[in-house]
Image (spheres, helix red, strand yellow):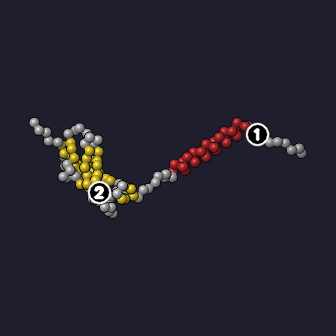
Amino acid sequence: MKLQKYKSKDPKKIGIILFTIVCVLLIAGVFLYTSFASFETIDSINFMNGKVQDPGDIYFAYYVDGEITWDLPLQNSGYTLDTESSNCTNGVVPSWDNALWRFIGDYSNYSPGNTRTRCELYFVKEKTVD
């Protein structure tokens, strides 16, 4: 018996099998890489005059004309924030920037509690003067 080199009868079939194996490994690698969280948690924020703890998540409840709603009133729709009625937990004082139409919180009296910070923002129609 004479030794001979092994030659595949169908090199195209072997190429397809190898290509499939490489694709499966690449997809598995991408899936595993993206499944791990890649973020950093910061427990405190440094300011010029000391450290302030991160307030964490803030949840908003919007009230338009005294009724709770999912939707924030649109800018230039005639609504403004009622600062007398609006409030937040954990010592956060709410205010509103009408020019940029966004929430601004004063965290100078912030004290972390056992609950997340919740803000109830009351919007009322501006009174027009004739």
Q: Earlier in the sequence, mark 2 or mark 1?
A: 1
Amino acid type, callout 2:
Ser
| Left or right: 5, with 27 as reference point | right
Q: Quadrant of residue 54?
A: bottom left
| Left or right: 43, with 15 as reference point | left
Comparing labels 2 and 1, the label whose residue is closer to the camera: 2
Quarter of the image for the C terminus: give it. top left
Q: Nearer the viewer, residue 75 or 44?
A: 44
Q: Which mark is residue 108?
A: 2
Q: Which mark is residue 8?
A: 1
Does residue 106 appear in the picture of this structure?
yes
Q: What kind of element bears circle 1? A: loop
| Left or right: 85, with 112 as reference point | left
Q: What kind of element bears circle 2? A: loop
Q: Residue at x 22, y 47 (%)?
A: 81
Does residue 119 appear in the picture of this structure?
no
Considering only vertical position in the picture, is 91 above or below 14?
below
| Residue 10 coordinates in the image, percent (x, y) | 73, 37
Quarter of the image for the N terminus: give it. top right
Amino acid type, callout 1:
Ser
| Residue 41 coordinates in the image, percent (x, y) | 44, 56
Considering only vertical position in the picture, is 114 above or below 72?
below
Farthest residue to the bottom: give it.
114
Farthest residue to the left: give it.
130
